[in-house]
Image: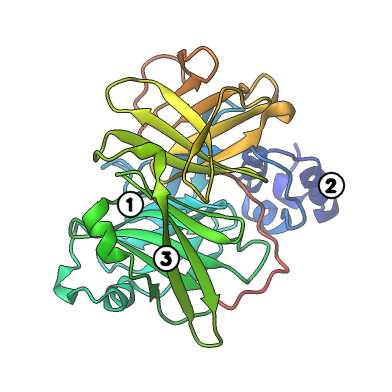
């Protein structure tokens, strides 16, 4: 009988180099400690199918494992991830932004290498926003995040967060290596015109759309010791003037910024290309070989040509375990039968590059 933990490292590396799907990579590293140490993927950035991160239930909220639903395997994959115990999680660029429920400490976490980058605490963010410290309570949580670049690839990036502090929505920014958050004076306007429903980084700028359909763009001015954020109102998307009447999610491609909208009275979704200068929408009726993955904290798009039979092209995949066919508007469930799964967000797997250095504090 083979003793798995005594297999030569060279052989393990050869096996790992044949792995193309993150779920298989996770399974390999879970065999034993020696495999986990020997098997790395610091040179691979092949496209991956997003994994559906499941929410912690009352029974497993403080467990060391978190579960992800895999479309390719059609099953739940368990990942050893004690760093998210008792924490709120939202995703961007394959990373999680986490905040502890009680002490309000914040980190960026790569969920598959478990690398952490420490962020300034929530109290620093609150001070930067000019909010009374006593306002930090149980209702304080991260709603959405957007990274300007993947920290696995570069150390030069900016993080934008939409945070809820006792029922009020605020936007803040952090540059890798900075000791404090930077604010945007759009916050007073956000209070007037509705919470941010989607934020994203596209073509060198951050964008935000509110539940009233207001589109904002943020210019980031870099200085040696700080950054300055200059918000500009662009337009009201599609002329909507009523709150909560539209579902807005921003999604970026390599050459366009898309927005997904839905009327609250009809289960009908539209995908449009957003003109970032005028706010006008150009309707898209076919995504070709691409499909969109949407969650409450954001969205992403992938080319399905490499995932035939797993991901359906020209569909929208929702965290509620169903898909929407853009062409015929039909809805199908991708998880068969009744499910007790409690979905949280889509996480697009990326492999952590060991040779990237960061100005942020890695834990």
Name the residue located 66 percent from the left edge and 38 percent from the top edge.
Answer: 24
Q: Tell me residue 177's x, y (percent).
A: 53, 79
Name the residue located 30 percent from the left edge and 40 percent from the top edge.
Answer: 57
Q: How many marks?
A: 3
Judge whether residue 347 can be spotted in this image: no
Secondary structure at numbered mark 2: helix
**Closer mark to the observer between disc 3 and disc 2:** 3
- Tags 3 and 1 touching, CB below 8 Å: no
- Tags 3 and 2 touching, CB below 8 Å: no
Q: Tell me residue 16's x, y (percent).
A: 77, 46
* Label 1 Cα crowd, 10 Å radius (few <14 / some 14-19 / many 20+): some
Secondary structure at numbered mark 3: strand
For the residues marked 3 and 2, what is the alpha-carbon distance in whole angstroms? Answer: 50 Å
User: What is the quadrant of the N terminus in the image?
Assistant: top right
* Residue behind mark 2: 14
Mark 3 or mark 1, which has the lower sequence index?
A: 1
Mark 3 or mark 2, which has the lower sequence index?
A: 2
| Image vertical order of residue 51 relative to residue 96, above or below | above
What's the image's color scheme? Answer: rainbow
| Image vertical order of residue 52 relative to residue 214, above or below | above
Q: Answer left or right for 11 relative to 252.
A: right
Name the residue located 56 percent from the left edge and 87 percent from the top edge.
Answer: 224
Q: Answer left or right for 235 relative to 301.
A: left
Judge whether residue 36 can be spotted in this image: yes
* Residue behind mark 1: 62
Name the residue located 35 percent from the left edge and 69 percent from the top edge.
Answer: 105
Secondary structure at numbered mark 1: loop
Q: Tell me residue 191's x, y (percent).
A: 23, 58
């Amino acid at each position: 009988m083979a003793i798995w933990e005594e297999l030569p490292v060279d052989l393990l590396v050869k096996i790992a180099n044949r792995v193309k799907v993150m779920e298989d990579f996770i399974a390999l590293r879970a065999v034993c400690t020696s495999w986990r140490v020997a098997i790395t993927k610091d040179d691979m950035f092949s496209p991956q199918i997003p994994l559906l991160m499941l929410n912690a239930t009352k029974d497993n909220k403080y467990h060391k494992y978190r579960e992800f639903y895999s479309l390719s395997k059609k099953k739940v994959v368990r990942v050893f991830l004690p760093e998210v115990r008792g924490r709120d999680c939202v995703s961007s660029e394959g990373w999680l932004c986490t905040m502890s429920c009680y002490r309000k400490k914040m980190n960026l976490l790569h969920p598959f290498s478990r690398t952490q980058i420490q962020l300034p605490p929530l109290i620093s963010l609150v001070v930067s926003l000019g909010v009374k410290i006593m306002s930090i309570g149980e209702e304080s949580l991260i709603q959405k995040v957007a990274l300007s670049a993947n920290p696995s690839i570069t150390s030069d990036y900016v993080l934008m967060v939409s945070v809820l502090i006792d029922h009020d929505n605020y936007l803040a920014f952090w540059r890798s290596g900075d000791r404090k958050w930077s604010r945007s004076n759009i916050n007073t306007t956000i209070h007037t015109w509705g919470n941010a429903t989607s934020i994203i980084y596209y073509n060198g700028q951050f964008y935000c759309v509110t539940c009233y359909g207001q589109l904002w763009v943020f210019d980031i001015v870099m200085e040696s010791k700080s950054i300055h954020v200059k918000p500009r109102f662009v337009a009201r998307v599609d002329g909507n003037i009523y709150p909560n009447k539209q579902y807005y999610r921003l999604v970026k491609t390599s050459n366009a910024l898309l927005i997904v909208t839905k009327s609250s009275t009809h289960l009908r979704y539209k995908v449009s290309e957003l003109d970032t200068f005028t706010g006008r929408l150009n309707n898209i009726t076919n995504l070709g070989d691409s499909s969109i993955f949407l969650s409450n904290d954001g969205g992403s798009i992938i080319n399905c040509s490499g995932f035939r039979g797993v991901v359906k092209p020209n569909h929208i995949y929702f965290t509620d375990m169903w898909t929407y066919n853009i062409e015929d508007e039909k809805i199908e469930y991708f998880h068969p039968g009744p499910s007790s799964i409690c979905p949280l967000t889509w996480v697009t797997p990326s492999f952590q590059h060991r040779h990237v250095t960061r100005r942020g504090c890695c834990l």
